[in-house]
Image (cartoon, coloured by chain):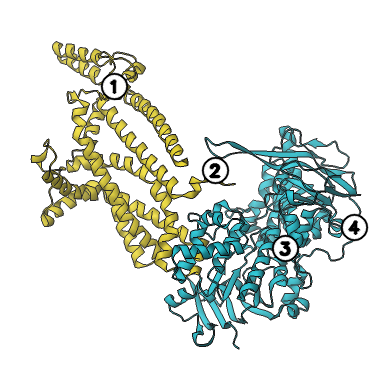
Chain colours: A yellow, B cyan
Amino acid sequence: MMFIRYAAYRLLTMILTLIVVSMLIFIIINLPPGDYLSNQIAELRATGQAEGVAKAEFLRTEYALDRPLWEQYLIWVGVAPGPQGFSGLLQGDFGWSFEFDAPVADIVGDALWLTVLVNLAAVLFVYMVALPLGVLAAARSATWVDYTTAFVGYLGLATPNFLLALILFYYGHKYLGLPIGGLMAPEFEGEPMSLAKVQSVLIHLIVPTFVIGTSGAAAMMQRLRANMLDELSKPYVETGMAKGLAPSKLLTKYPLRMAFNPFVADIGNLLPAMVSGSVLVSVVLGLQTIGPALLTALKSQDQFLAAFVLMFVALLTLIGTMISDLLLVLLDPRIRYGAREG
Amino acid sequence: MAPLLDVKNLSIGFGSAPPVVAGVNFSVSSGETLALVGESGSGKTLTCRSILRILPKTAQLRQGEVMFGTGEARANLLTLSQRDIRDIRGNRISMIFQEPMRSLSPLHRIGNQVSEVLTLHRDMSADEAKRDVLATFERVGFADPERAFRAYPFEMSGGMRQRAMIAMAMVAKPDLLIADEPTTALDVTTQAQVLGLMKDLQRDTGMAMILVTHDLGVVANMADSVVVMNKGHVMESGPAPAVLGAPGHGYTKKLFAAAPMIPKDPTPADPLPDKDLILELNNVCKTYTVRAGGWRAKKQVHACVDVNLKLPRGKTLAVVGESGSGKTTCARIALGAEVPDEGSRVLFRAEPGAEPVCINDLSRAEKVAFQRQAQMVFQDPYSSLSPRMRVQEALTEPMEIHRIGDRMARRDKAAEMLRWVGLDPDMLARYPHAFSGGQRQRLSIARALTLDPVLLVCDEPTSALDVSVQEQILSLLERIRDGMGLSYLFISHDLAVVARIADEVAVMRQGVVVEQAPPETLFYNPRHPYTKALIAAQPEPDVHRPIDLAEVARGAGSSCSWPDMYRFEGVDAPDLIQIDPGHKVRCHV
């Protein structure tokens, strides 16, 4: 019961945050003087292409770019009527991309789900690598196990991602026959889902997952190790020893449970860090994620496309933090029963 | 018959340094209690932990053997395989640790942590284990064992957690129980009850017990035989009545001399004069509003209720109470560090005959002046001195803040204060880490004195120190008080310490002063059941004066269980009534 109330409360705060974030995004994108169309009009005027100017002027009224900023915002969100009536995010209309001359929904379409896929794979990779290695490094601290994992971890942190990507592509292709670039073989693009397509996507995922996840895994491993070392010196570990618990059981039942909290709390931070961190990697690896689209949109002030991508990243972040907060409540009775204390 | 446990010639060391436990011998038989006594650094904890081989990673067992068991099964615990020693831990030898707050995992239910011992060693199903655990919970005094089984540690008080720890240690019915300062972190009335429980359990099961403690009073109440340790060596050992009755070794004698005691044959003292009061607390109340969380209801906590205290110049007024009694809140209010509720008045007279100032509505300039005149000495000398400041910086900083004197004058003053507290002025250039606990407390006293205050608030100044050091610090405080004409507001949980230094004692319980009198009068004729419980619970280093558990139980419980004359519910306490000159008790007329 408590949990449901807390979840509802958390959902409410998430929605409020999302509203504030949407305002900030819209304001920041519109901070530079002018917009995509006024820039274009100026350029067309300079080169004397009158009919182009007329079309751009038409688009400006069509997308309400001639109105005050707050009105534009309300129209974009879909709570105020625009030139086509109510048609904004709330109605499922993500707007028009001027740069690509197509609806935003069409441009991001597949990329949205591929982004989620690539980043989820990377997050899974981070946790699967960091958990055992971090625990092992703490349990065998100041031995060769500890030093080796730390060394590999620092290598992962220090190597630039794009360099790592190029190296892996080269050797992966040379020795394992892994494909280079993209997230699926070209013949599947735009095709409906099929077993062969899933297979192709999975094989293409290997290198990007590794590249995007390595530094995150290295950082998280070091954090987990430090947390574990703190916990290992707590008196309740001695209590466990005095009970006669075997070392492995002792380690996993008590200190690991305690060290898990920050580990779980990191889920929220990990998602956005990976999405924004993987932009460069996506460009280098030729991944069809929204990373490259965001880059282009920001460069050319393509406001609806940029705003949508940023909103999407914000949403991922908020969902991530909400998941980690709810998990923490489930995992830690001190948070759950906080009310009964004292 | 050979004793159950025989420790022979045990030596433990770190690195290449000389051993910190050297050639220790002792033995314990079934049904017997052995006390390992010593001050910090004596090696008593390492010794008891080496029996189960729960030692820091860098500690080396250099020599000796620990024989445990009877007949065929007798073995040297120090050479057993890891697997075999794990079979002994928690099963045949169990251990209780000092800090019940931190010795239980906060994330697992009490029942889970306790029944783990049985599922581990007894091959029991979870249901069978639960049945045994519930029986043990009942035995250690949980009113509702089922509820305790489901509870998390943070839902329990310190005393209850230590009972859970005892249940965990007892549930497998071990042959030997090792208790490492099991009651040091507990309030004195709780300590009395926990010690009583341990004694009962031992009588029931006939197990042997090793009790590690620094408190001779606890030894006198519990032990059959005593081993006194100092700096890794055994100073003296033998049956408890002999060692406690007529200590042979100089070190043991010193420990006895230093242990503060409640006077045996007190005579009532004259009440304190009621004139030239340096500090007056009039109707001081403090209510905290606790917000549990965004959507939960607020709660009110009454930390102080209608406290009236008068401190005559040059005297020591002690406020005594257990944790949560509001004694520290009182001290903070007296210093102006905390704002009391509306209607409370704290009056301060810097000089005799001066017009009193009310410290809650001072102007900025008056406040600065007051802060010079009233200083504080803190409980923990390890955390109240910055490790990054030299002694000279620490001692001159207050004078810099108040812009007193120039560099040379400040330095001279700091050197003079060091001499006052018995330290060498050459130490000005050192950092605090170069000093022992007692020396650090001298430093923080010296720091408080650099501004020439007239009032010193001491918040448990000796609780973090060893008994012999405590004795020195108390003597020092007395000497300074009389030499400089200071007045003390002295906060403590320890009646014996208070008996030594105070001219007047106020006993506080849950925000309310229940009894107030000069210490001699209080010990001669304690009236309130709570005061009686506090006095009865104080362990005395005398085997002929055991703790009176019945008396403790009468006064330490809820205020609803007291005799009619004193009983009250909630915050609806009766008035503080003067029954003799200078002796006030909170009771119905």
From the viewer's perspective, is residue B260 above or below residue A79?
Answer: below
User: How far apart, in angstroms, are the residues tagged by discs 1 and 3?
Assistant: 75 Å
Q: Mark 1 or mark 2: which comes first in sequence?
A: 1
Q: Position of residue A78 (x, y in %)?
A: 31, 20
Q: Nearer the viewer, residue B566 or B407?
A: B566
Residue annotated with mark 3: B470
Count numbered badges in the picture. Answer: 4
Residue annotated with mark 4: B268
Q: Amino acid at mark 1?
A: Gly
Q: Are marks 1 and 2 on the same chain?
A: yes
Q: Are marks 1 and 3 on the same chain?
A: no
Residue annotated with mark 2: A339
Crowd tier of the residue under label 3, counting other residues whose Cα lies within 10 Å: few below 14, some 14–19, many 20 or above: many
Picture residue at 75% right of the left edge, 73% below the top: B254
Q: Chain of mark 2?
A: A
User: How far apart, in angstroms, are the residues tagged by discs 2 and 3?
Assistant: 40 Å
